[in-house]
Structure formats: C-alpha cells, structure tokens
C-alpha cells in the first residue's frame, strides 16, 4: 500500500488574516483552472485526504475556497492570500498519493494565474517492502556466525499500472510550460530480534543465572528487519 504522508484538508471559506496581524502587506492572487481532469479509474473520493492547493514551506497562505467544494469541481476559482516579499510559492496535487508540484514566483505574474486544464494522475509508483529473519545457534556466550535458517519476503505490485509520468505540460496565462517530473526514493529500516521459542527463553535465563560455570547451555535467537522503499513524484516550475 502506498505509504505516503497525509495532508490536512483545507477549509472552504478559510479565514483571511489582515496585514496588520503580520506587520506586512498581503497580496491576493486568483487561481483559475478551467477544467480539472481525473486519470482513468480515479474518483473524487480517492483524493479527499489531500488538498489540491498546498501551503508553501515559508510564509503563510490562506484560501477563499477549497477545490473539493462540489459547487466548483471540475473547475477551480480560488483566491490565495500571500504575505508579500520573497518567493511566492504554492503547490498543486499531482496524484492520488499526495505527491505535488511546486509553482514558484507567483509575484512575477499579474493578479491571475489561469490554467486551461490540469490532470491529476493515478499513482503508479510501487512502494516495496522486504522482510528478512535469520536464526542463530548459541552456546553460552558464543554464537555460530552463520545462521541455521533464513526467511525472506518481498511485496509485489497488486496492479498493472505502469509508470509513465515524466513531464507535465501546463498552459498558464497563455504560455506553455513543460515541467520535468522527478522520482525520488526514501528507505526506512526497522530491525528487531528475539527468542524464537519459549524453551529458548528459559535456556537463556538458565545461562544468565549460571555465568561462570562450565556447563554448556544451548539456545537460539533470531534477528530480522523490515526495509521499506517509498517512491514519490515531485516537480518544480519557476514562473516567468
């Protein structure tokens, strides 16, 4: 299953903070998309966990309405309020996994950012998970270096979706922009160990209580881990 971070829903009718609250001027940009297209097999319900317009890393942005309001879909007409100064940035949803493209330098355009059509894709990046367990023999405080048994699992894709998302082409304010789409991967490792059977726990406890004696006590342990590889799309557009 796709492991992705969950972005909070944006409220329809967000409160617009005044410039007095920040001691800075604010600038309002209108975001218009004539038609939003959902990829084959996608429904609005698949996207409810994500906001269409994302907040920038720096600075505060508020919205006049939310994309998922049924009165607007499949078009978008939203007013976005920025704190003035620096790079005015927003992000748009790419797919049903919450991946995004970033649009930078909205301060370079006039009051309106007008996109003729925008497509939200079905996520085709497969997050893989591998798990391994190795079992070892112990004699007192010595361990046999080579495991006596190994187990290994790897998750497999559950659909025939093929990754074809390499670029996005958007017509913004009459200009065509081609946005390269990058693929990135994050690896997460979680390890664990233990005693495979109840009798091994008792034998290890017996060894611990008889340290220093010449009696040989045999017990087994196991060592394992999960390796998760999470893949995501991203893109960046610098407006001109």
Image (tube, rainbow, N blue to C red):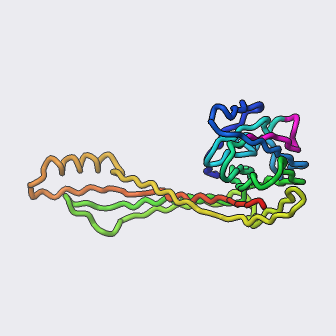
Q: Residue at x 68, y 59 (%)?
A: 234
State the count of labels.
0
State which region is magenta.
70-81
In-front residue for pair 16/20: 20
Residue 53 seen in the figure:
yes
* Residue 55 percent coordinates (x, y): 67, 45
Q: Residue at x 62, y 60 (%)?
A: 231
In-front residue for pair 100/124: 100
* Residue 166 percent coordinates (x, y): 75, 67
* Residue 121 percent coordinates (x, y): 78, 55
* Residue 233 percent coordinates (x, y): 68, 59
Query: Does the segment drawn in magenta span residue 72?
Result: yes
> Is residue 198 toward the left or the right of residue 185 in the image?
left
Query: Does the segment drawn in magenta span residue 107?
Result: no
Q: Residue at x 66, y 48 (%)?
A: 56
> Is residue 194 toward the left or the right of residue 14 in the image?
left
Q: Quadrant of residue 27?
A: top right
């Amino acid at each position: 299953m796709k492991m992705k971070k969950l972005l909070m829903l944006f409220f329809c009718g967000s409160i617009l903070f005044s410039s007095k609250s920040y001691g800075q001027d604010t600038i309002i940009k209108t975001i218009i998309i004539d038609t939003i297209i959902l990829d084959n097999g996608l429904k609005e319900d698949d996207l409810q966990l994500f906001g269409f317009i994302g907040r920038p890393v720096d600075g505060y942005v508020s919205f006049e309405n939310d994309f998922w309001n049924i009165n607007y879909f499949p078009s978008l007409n939203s007013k976005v309020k920025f704190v003035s100064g620096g790079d005015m940035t927003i992000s748009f949803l790419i797919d049903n996994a919450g991946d995004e493209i970033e649009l930078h330098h909205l301060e370079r355009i006039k009051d309106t950012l007008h996109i003729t059509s925008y497509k939200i894709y079905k996520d085709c990046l497969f997050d893989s998970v591998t798990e391994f367990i190795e079992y070892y023999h112990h004699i007192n405080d010595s361990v046999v270096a080579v495991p006596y048994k190994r187990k290994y699992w790897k998750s497999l894709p559950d659909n025939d979706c093929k990754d074809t998302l390499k670029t996005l082409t958007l017509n913004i304010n009459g200009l065509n922009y081609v946005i390269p789409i990058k693929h990135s991967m994050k690896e997460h490792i979680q390890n664990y160990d233990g005693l495979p059977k109840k009798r091994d726990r008792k034998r290890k406890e017996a060894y611990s209580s008889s340290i220093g004696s010449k009696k040989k006590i045999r017990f087994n342990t196991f060592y394992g881990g999960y390796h998760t590889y999470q893949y995501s799309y991203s893109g960046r557009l610098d407006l001109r």
